[in-house]
Image (cartoon, rainbow, N blue to C red):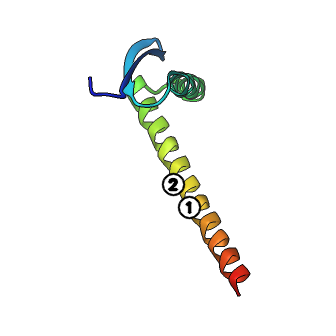
Amino acid sequence: MSEGKRRYKATIDGETYTIIGQKPQEHMRVVAETVDDQLNQLKEMTKGLDKEKRAILLAINAVSDQLAMRKELNEIKEKYKQLEENQEN
């Protein structure tokens, strides 16, 4: 394993996974718990779907949230840039 990488074992939707990454263990724990919680919510809301389809829905939701946050961050950066330019004038 390359330097700086950590291994973390997590149980998500009843399955054990080994997650490898550079983030601290606490971060990986929160991520795994969040994924497990969201999968459990989807399981309750979509009783007819199998695990794979629920996982795809979770991925779609995660990417949608990521894109929305990226857009919001870019808007904040643009406002900040405009404020800096106005202060210079």
Residue type, numbered disc 1 = Lys
Name the quadrant of the C terminus: bottom right
Residue type, numbered disc 2 = Leu
Name the quadrant of the N terminus: top left
Which disc number belongs to residue 67?
2
Q: Residues within 10 Å of mark 1 (few under 14, many from 20)?
A: few
Q: Determine the image quadrant of residue 44.
A: top right
Q: Give me the residue at 46% from left, 43% from top.
A: 60
Residue in the foreground of this view, choosing between 64 and 41: 64
- Name the secondary structure under disc 1: helix
**CB-based contact (under 8 Å), mark 1 and mark 2:** yes
Which disc number belongs to residue 18?
none
Q: Give me the residue at 73% from left, 80% from top.
A: 87
Work out which residue is located at the far front of the displayed protein and give it.
88
Q: Name the spot of residue 72 as percent of width and height, x first.
A: 61, 60
Question: Seen in the image, is 33 located left or right of residue 85?
Answer: left
Q: Give me the residue at 57% from left, 28% from top.
A: 38
